[in-house]
Every structure is written in C-alpha cells, then in structure tokens.
Image (cartoon, rainbow, N blue to C red):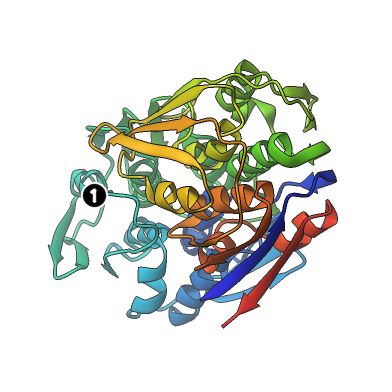
Amino acid sequence: MSKLIVNGGKRLSGEISIGGAKNSTVALIPAAILADTPVSFDSVPDILDVHNLMLILESMNVSSEFKHDVLTIDPTHIVEAPLPSKAIKSLRASYYFMGALLGRFHRATVSFPGGDNIGPRPIDQHIKAFKALGAEVVEENGTVTITTGENGLHGAQIFLDMVSVGATINAILAAVKAPGTTVIGNAAKEPEIIDIATFLNNMGANIRGAGTDVIRIEGVEKLIASNTHTIIPDRIEAGTYLSLAAAVGDGIMIDNVIPEHLESYIAKMEEMGCDLQVSEDKIFVTPTDDLKPIQVKVMPFPGFATDLQQPLTPLLLKANGRSVIVDTIYPKRIKHISELNKLGAKVKSEDTDEGIIVVDQTDDLRGAEVSAGEIRAGACLLIAGLMAKGTTTIDQADNILRGYGSVIEKLTAIGADVRLVRD
C-alpha cells in the first residue's frame, strides 16, 4: 500500500476540474459487456477501480484500452471464464458483473465482492431481482452462482424492499435483453442510474423512468454502440473538493460540476455560512471564517449522500459549536473518527446502531500518522491533513486513489504540499 504525505497549514487557491463519476464508471464498465459492438467512454477517471475492472475484462477475453480519459472496450470476442478473485474482492462494484453476465450469457458465477468495509451491505435485493427475472441463485462459501432454465430470462415485476443503487443497476443490466416487460418498483433515483440508462438507451435499449422510483424496461435483442458515451461529473468528488475549498481555500473554483446533483449538499454548506457562487457548471468558493454548526441526516438521493458525510466532517470542525450527522444508510461508517481524533479533532460516535456522529469545534489540528480505512474516510483525512499544522502521513492511501483520480496533480495545482510514497 502507498502513503500520502501531507504538509498542512497552507491556504490554497486556484481551480480544480472534476472528473467523471466513479459510481457511474464502475457500473458502465461491466455494462459494456452487454454490447454487441465495441464501446467507448469519455471523461473516465484514472482511478484504481478502473484498472481492476479492466483486469476482470481481460480474464473474459474482452480487450480494453485507457488513454487520455477515454476507455475503449471490445466485448465482441467475450468468453465465459472464471473471474479473477483478487480483482473481484478488491472492489464492491464488481457485483455488477452478476447482472451483466446474466444478461449476456443467462448465467454467472462471481465471488462475493469486496470493497470498502463500511458495514453490512447485503446483496439480497440483487438476488431477489434475479429470481424474479427467472434465475436460480445459489450463494455458497462466498461465491454466487446464477443460472437460468431453457427459457432463459423474462420480463417481470420487481419491487425492491429497500432503495438500493446496486440492486437497481443490477436489475437493469439483467433485464435489458430479457424478452418482455420488466418493471422495477422502489428503484433508486441517483444520477448514476440515469447515466447507465442513457448509455444503454443510446445503444438501442428501451429503458424509461430512470431517475424516478419506477423504471420500465422492454427487452431488446441487440445493443449497438455508435457514439462515445461521456460520463457525468462525479458529484462525490465535487462535494469533497467543495469541503476542502471551504476549509483551507483562499478562493477556489470547482469546474465541471452539475449543481443539481449536489443540491442537498450545497444547501447544507450554505446553511453553515459558506460563501458559494453557483454557476451553470462550476462553483466558486470564497473563504469565510464565520461558520455555524448544522445537523445532517443522510438519505437516498436527492437527499444528502452517505458518501459525503465523511468529506464534510473536517469542515464541521471549523463551525462555532456542535454539529450532528445521522447516517441512516451506513450507520457503521465511522472509520474516520478515531483517525481524525489522532490529529486533535473532537469527533465521536454516540450510537453506532443509529449512525449518530457528533462533531465539536476544533481550532488546533496537528499532523500525525493516520490510516485511510476506505475511500471516503481517506478523503476526510486528506482534508484534515491539509487543515492541520505540520506533517500528516496517511497510510493505506491506495484507498483514496480508488475513488479520486489525479488527486496529487489536482491538489498540487492549487498550492498543496502533498506527495505519494509507494512501499
């Protein structure tokens, strides 16, 4: 694993351009194997998860090339093959190969995916969707085996017991070529789901309602790509840099954003007293020292994103009073707390079952050695390290690189003193 060395206490200024959405990209790459032609993606973030997914594609004889933010994938010579367990277990989003392989071959065998350890994230809703579409699913010893009978998959009514981005996308991938009509009820509404549906529809799929809680799919026989698909900007990366800009910035412009995807987050920052000048595709953050404490409740989109509660936490340390975060989605998402406190922060988890995090004002952060247990915890520690006086060493920095493309270059460009050291 790598280390990130952060010499903090500096005021930063300049411009940061947001890359393509990680949470779209990691679903679009598995979705590409459903195509009957080569496909191309633009604005692809240069993150470790992309390279791991390319390794998985290679194991199926699917060629791919990543150059200058453009990823080309040729699934026309795909073969069924065991997927590399190391790559599968390294990232949670590898579970999208279940839906994609099921849609392509009507069967799939995938090791139980890994990724960030932020508490239980069961795949029961995914399995429920696959069964509704006509599949048989066996989960044993960390491996999920999905098969269909002679008639393959068929359209079906699917109602998700809980809102799940992963289950919604997996159901779409499995159903897009299944004969008949599929209706997904209680579907997730995230922008990334609209992005996946747009990509598939541009190849000839018939998906309606993406972005609402009811998605209707008419199965098609073929998916033919004719244009490069440009991935939407990453709202989580944007929110992370907005927090950083408000915490240590002397005027920072965040480019290539879709403000509508960040409305709940922007509202909370403005409630704190942050000075944000929001334009059509950019946000300028003006420094301010008079910040108020707030209460944040994490909710499914369009509510406050769970992926942004950790990146916001260092900024809350500057608020004049006590802030409270309630993460209703991943209440065990608290790995950043003990690490932040090593820097001198005053953060505690009052009830891990309810996901209640309490943040008190801290004026004196000092560098220390900390560990990035997962992507967003790492982003949180990076911001705190930039706020702290002295040197902060962030171990397990590969977790940050999994979610934030070109992070060293982007931070260096605005005046940050950060460097990556590989073991």
150 lies left or right of 173 = left
Q: Position of residue 22 (x, y in %)?
A: 56, 52
Q: Where is residue 230 in the image (x, y as percent from the top left)?
A: 69, 49
Q: Who's the residue at 52% across and 37% down the image?
A: 313
Q: Residue furthest right?
A: 14
Is 291 above or below relative to 246? above
Q: Using the image as rendered, state which of residue 168 and residue 359 is in the foreground.
A: 359
One can see residue 83 in this view: no
Residue 114 in sight here: yes
Q: Which of 216 and 379 is in front in this view?
A: 379
Left or right: 305 as drawn, with respect to 411? left
Residue visible at 32% across and 27% down?
186
- Taking the image as shown, residue 388 lies to the left or right of residue 25, namely right
Q: Is residue 183 left or right of residue 31?
A: left
- Tell which of 174 and 222 is nearer to you: 174
Circle 1 packing at 10 Å, graded few (<14), some (14-19), many (20+), is few
The kind of residue on which mark 1 rests is Pro
Give the mark count. 1
Instruction: Report the front residue among 38 and 377.
Output: 377
Q: Please identify the quarter of the rendering in which residue 106 is found.
A: bottom left
**Which residue sits at x=56%, y=31%?**
316
Label 1: which secondary element: loop
Q: Where is residue 110 in the image (x, y as percent from the top left)?
A: 29, 68
Give the position of the C terminus as an image quadrant: bottom right
The residue under the point 23% across, 49% down is 122
Find the residue positioned furthest to the front: 364
Query: Which residue position is annotated with label 1?
Result: 122
Query: Where is residue 246 drawn, in percent x and y?
Result: 71, 34
- Place residue 132 in its image quadrant: top left
